[in-house]
Amino acid sequence: MKILVVTVGKVRGPLIESVQEYEKRASRYWKIEFISVAQESARSISPEKVKEAEASRILSKVPVQFELIALTREGEGITSLGLSEFLDKRLMDALP
């Protein structure tokens, strides 16, 4: 199973260390790749158009056969353990 994490904008500052640590730990269990797409400039367009442009960039990076799961502030809360269990279930479902 491969996990592709797509972020909008570059991960910077103290967050980069957290991402690198998570990637190191997660790579023991799954193939994992982190990529970023350009952040849309919001100077002259509506927030909805910004979201549409960024969503289009994200979707262009995700292979068609991948299951898409968006992690947003508005979404359901999940703990690290809950995420791990979710991914383990997906891994077991994918095995022949």
Image (cartoon, rainbow, N blue to C red):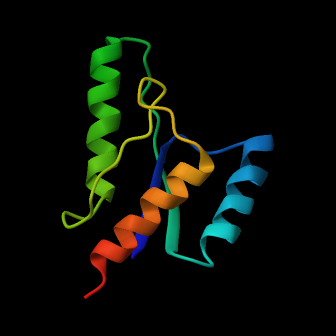
Image x and y of residue 10, in percent = 59, 45
Does residue 13 appear in the picture of this structure? no
Image x and y of residue 42, in percent = 43, 17
Residue nearest the viewer, comparing 2 with 54: 2
Task: Give the answer, above or below, for where 92 lies relative to 90.
Answer: below
Residue nearest the viewer, comparing 67 with 36: 67
The quarter of the picture where residue 86 lies is: bottom left
Looking at the figure, which quarter contains the C terminus? bottom left
| In the image: residue 51, left or right of residue 76 | left
Residue depicted at x 74% and y 51%: 18
Residue nearest the viewer, comparing 63 with 24: 24
Residue depicted at x 54% and y 59%: 84
Residue depicted at x 45% and y 41%: 38
| In the image: residue 74, left or right of residue 49 | right
| In the image: residue 61, left or right of residue 34 | left
| In the image: residue 12, left or right of residue 88 | right
How many marks can you see?
0
Image x and y of residue 89, in percent = 39, 66
Looking at the figure, which quarter contains the N terminus? bottom left
Task: Give the answer, above or below, for where 79 lies relative to 48.
Answer: below
Does residue 35 appear in the picture of this structure? yes
Residue nearest the viewer, comparing 59 with 94: 94
Image x and y of residue 17, in percent = 78, 53
**In the image, farthest residue toward the bottom:** 96
